[in-house]
Amino acid sequence: PLFIGLIYSLPYAFGELVNSAIKRQLGIEPGKTTKSSLKSLQYFFDLSDGIIMAALMLAIVTSVTLVQATTASALGIAFHFGTDKLIGLLDLK
């Protein structure tokens, strides 16, 4: 279980770190979004960066097909989007 946890958590964290590094290079403060027309794209990557990396690792180290990994990624992103909106509606964010 520890090895499996590392296999998926490290790529997830790497995706988050890359996204954060890009945001810092663009001058976007932590926890903030851009004011430009790319706001929706940034929001998508904020929600999906780690999920995409973990799904990619899932496809690489298991017998999961790319279609299955993509489906898992899409479901994860949708769930993350839903919980993010719910947290906003409940004024917890």
Image (tube, rainbow, N blue to C red):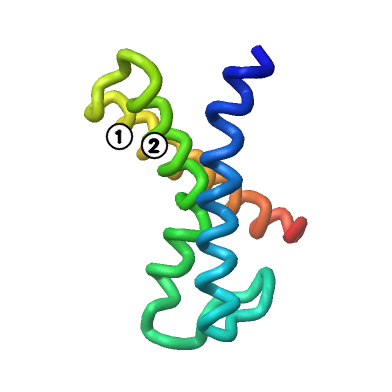
CA–CA distance in space, label 2 to label 1: 5 Å
Residue beneath the point at 54% across and 27% down: 7
Tags 2 and 1 in contact by the CB under 8 Å rule? Answer: yes
Q: Is residue 66 left or right of residue 91?
A: left
Secondary structure under tag 2 reads helix
Q: Is residue 84 visible?
A: yes
Residue 33, by quadrant, is bottom right
Q: In the image, what residue type sits under mark 2?
A: Ser
Secondary structure under tag 1 reads helix
Residue beneath the point at 38% across and 30% down: 72
Residue 93 to residue 55: above or below: below
Residue beneath the point at 51% across and 46% down: 50
Q: In the image, what residue type sits under mark 1?
A: Thr
User: Which residue was labeled with disc 1?
Assistant: 70
Residue 77 to residue 57: above or below: below
Residue beneath the point at 50% across and 87% down: 35
Q: Nearer the viewer, residue 43 or 8?
A: 8
The image quadrant where one finds the C terminus is bottom right
Q: In this view, does 8 lie to the left or right of 71?
A: right
User: Which residue was labeled with disc 2?
Assistant: 73
The image quadrant where one finds the N terminus is top right
